[in-house]
Amino acid sequence: MDSLLLEMIAARATASGNPATAEMVARLRSSSSGAGPALTAEELLAQLGQGNPMAGLLAKHLAESKQRRTVIDVEPADEETSESAAESAPPDAAMSELRACAESMFAELKVLRERSDCLAAALGACCLCWGEDPECRGCRGRGRPGYAIPDETQFEEYVLPAVLTLRAQRARKGTPTPNPQPKSTHPGA
């Protein structure tokens, strides 16, 4: 990586009070200059995942996909043949495989974000944080479901079928459907 870019990232991490990220960037800078031990992508994501849930999910996904890889219909090869094949494999092949994996993950992330946005609209929730981040630029942490008027089309597509199924299940069991009462905001009520 470009050393100037790493310096900028380290400065920003330090300024934001994130020492773990600053330490990782420092290790990455030292490993790229050959001064320290190399920091692998798995280590970097694992460390980032401790403070960032998205990075944690990405690290978990990478670990799971690495475990799922299996070789099918391959004849056992001699050790000499497999070693020479590994040595002759161009580094571009590994890079293009990594690039394809990253593109696949970004495509999946895009689909999941769109799905989350649709569900947030259906429930009237903040699509950025769902009301869990007091520093959210959209809702300041107040954007739980019901924060805004739900999108009727999205509600009918995503929520209504689940509500109807739940009511039908309760009707079969003879369980009364609860009637949620809104919480009173008045201290005397």
Image (cartoon, rainbow, N blue to C red):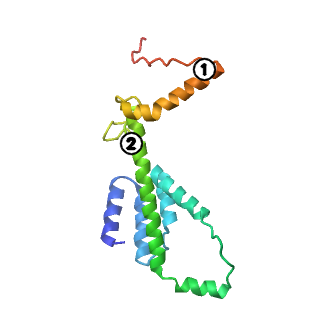
Q: Position of residue 134 (x, y in %)?
A: 37, 38
Which quarter of the rendered picture does the C terminus lie within? Answer: top left
Q: Amino acid at mark 2?
A: Asp
Q: Amino acid at mark 1?
A: Ala
The nearer-to-camera label among 1 and 2 is: 1
Which quarter of the rendered picture does the N terminus lie within? Answer: bottom left
List the residue tagged with mark 2: 117
Label count reads 2
User: What residue appears at the point 51 percent right and 17 percent down from the top-left corner?
Assistant: 179
Q: Which mark is residue 62?
A: none
User: What residue appears at the point 42 percent right and 11 percent down from the top-left corner?
Assistant: 188
Q: Residues within 10 Å of mark 1 (few under 14, many from 20)?
A: few
List the residue tagged with mark 1: 171
Task: Work out whether mark 1 precedes mark 2 in sequence or the reverse, and give the earlier one.
Answer: 2
Placement of 47 over or under 156, stated as above or below: below
User: What residue appears at the point 40 percent right and 65 percent down from the top-left corner?
Assistant: 25
Placement of 10 over or under 79, stated as above or below: above
Q: Nearer the viewer, residue 73 or 97?
A: 73
Left or right, 70 with respect to 59, comes to: right
Q: Nearer the viewer, residue 142 or 25?
A: 142
Q: Position of residue 108 (x, y in %)?
A: 45, 55
In the picture, residue 130 is in which quadrant? top left
Q: Position of residue 85 (x, y in %)?
A: 57, 85
Tag 1 secondary structure: helix
